[in-house]
């Protein structure tokens, strides 16, 4: 059974940092597109960062320069380093995998596997 399990979320003050992890089990995702999405209260889920198997990355403009997506293939784990956090970064963060690599950057509707999410709350 394929599972993606996020961890690392929590409460942080503005300007602080968090590192999210997404541990994969049941399948190796080293050749897939991996991505982080987030969903704020009352808003749609949105793509914020993605990583191709080549190492190429994509970032939503609002997080570019503050967030870094990376992976450790040996641990089959995806990361999201989040620095200089803002109030508007408050959301539930989800990792996801696109096995078919059909579009770049990947689309929400094209993701094949999802984690259950980890909440991030940024306070002033």
Image (cartoon, helix red, strand yellow):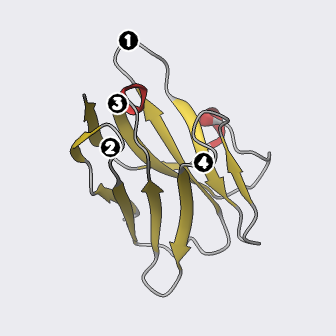
Q: Earlier in the sequence, mark 4 or mark 3?
A: 4
Q: Residues within 10 Å of mark 1 (few under 14, many from 20)?
A: few
Locate residue 16, reporting x and y percent: 32, 48
Spatial distance from mark 4 to mark 1, Cα to Cα?
A: 21 Å
Q: Residues within 10 Å of mark 4 (few under 14, many from 20)?
A: many
Q: Which disc number belongs to residue 42?
A: 1
User: For the residues carrying marks 3 and 1, which lies nearer the camera in this image?
Assistant: 3
Q: Which disc number belongs to residue 90?
A: 3
In the visual, does 106 lie left or right of 102? left
User: Element at badge 2?
Assistant: loop
User: Element at badge 3?
Assistant: loop
Q: Which disc number belongs to residue 49?
A: 4
- All told, the count of numbered labels is 4
Seen at 67% across and 35% down, the residue is 61
Spatial distance from mark 3 to mark 1, Cα to Cα?
A: 12 Å
Seen at 72% across and 70% down, the residue is 55
């Amino acid at each position: 059974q394929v599972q993606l399990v996020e961890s690392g979320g929590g409460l942080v003050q503005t300007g602080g940092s968090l590192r999210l992890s997404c541990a994969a089990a049941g399948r190796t995702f080293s050749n897939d597109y991996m991505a982080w999405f987030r969903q704020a209260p009352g808003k749609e889920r949105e793509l914020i960062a993605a990583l191709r198997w080549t190492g190429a990355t994509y970032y939503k403009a609002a997080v570019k320069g503050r967030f870094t997506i990376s992976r450790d293939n040996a641990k089959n784990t995806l990361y999201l380093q989040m620095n200089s956090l803002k109030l508007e970064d408050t959301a539930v963060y989800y990792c996801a995998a696109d096995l078919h690599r059909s579009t770049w950057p990947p689309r929400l509707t094209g993701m094949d596997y999802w984690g259950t999410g980890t909440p991030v709350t940024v306070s002033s």
